[in-house]
Image: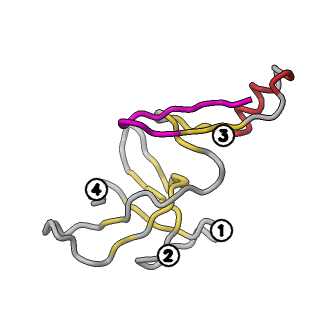
Amino acid sequence: MHTSTDLILEIVDPNTEKQLPPEEVGEVVVTLFDEAYPLIRLGTGDLSKQISEDCVCGLVMERIEEFMGRIGDAVKVRGLFVHPRQVAEVISGFPELGDFLIEITRENDRDFMRLQG
């Protein structure tokens, strides 16, 4: 993925928050100096790495590998982050359900979340 020239993108060690060299996997951290909505070192929770080799398309821009995983247990579903503890809080109101499993899938560019109790 090519990155935008409108932002500062860093790949950092999730534990130390120090910037990592190209080709090392870490958390994507973004700084965007936008008047309406500035973001200063926003940790996205997404894992990726900077790619140092030139792109075959010919563009000379910073690039990162596509999504390689997440930090923590939150998952993005239809553009919103869902935390298991949030689901557990809702389920606690229905003790008859007992243990539960959350299954998140993606089909035809749509996210689906299914709860099995």
The residues tagged by marks 1 and 3 sit, at their Cα atoms, a distance apart of 20 Å
The residues tagged by marks 2 and 3 sit, at their Cα atoms, a distance apart of 27 Å
Q: Where does label 1 land, which residue?
A: 15
The residues tagged by marks 3 and 4 sit, at their Cα atoms, a distance apart of 29 Å
- Sequence-first tag of 4 and 1: 4
Front one among 38 and 43: 43
Magenta-colored span:
105-117
Given this view, does label 1 or label 3 mark the residue nearer the observer? 3
Q: Please give the name of the residue rendered at 56% of the width and 55% of the height, measured from the top-left corner.
A: 70
Front one among 76 and 22: 76
Q: Where does label 4 land, which residue?
A: 4
**Measured from the top left, where is residue 14 in percent x and y?**
60, 65
Residue 62 image-quadrant placement: bottom left
Residue 10 image-quadrant placement: bottom left
Q: Main secondary structure of the magenta part?
A: strand
How many neighbours does mark 2 have within 10 angstroms: few (below 14), some (14-19), or many (20 or more)? Answer: some
Determine the residue located farthest toward the front in the rendered image: 116
The residues tagged by marks 2 and 4 sit, at their Cα atoms, a distance apart of 19 Å
- Amino acid on which the number 4 mark rests in the picture: Ser
Q: Please give the name of the residue rendered at 21% of the width and 70% of the height, measured from the top-left corner.
A: 55
Q: In the image, is residue 115 part of the stretch drawn in magenta?
A: yes
Position of 56 with respect to 29 (left or right) is left
- Quadrant position of the C terminus in the picture: top right
**Measured from the top left, where is residue 98 in percent x and y?**
84, 29
- Sequence-first tag of 2 and 4: 4
- Amino acid on which the number 3 mark rests in the picture: His
Q: Where does label 2 land, which residue?
A: 20
Determine the residue located farthest toward the left in the rendered image: 58
Q: Are marks 2 and 4 in contact (CB under 8 Å)?
A: no
- Quadrant position of the N terminus in the picture: bottom left
Above or below, 70 relative to 57: above
Q: Please give the name of the residue rendered at 46% of the width and 48% of the height, measured from the top-left corner.
A: 39
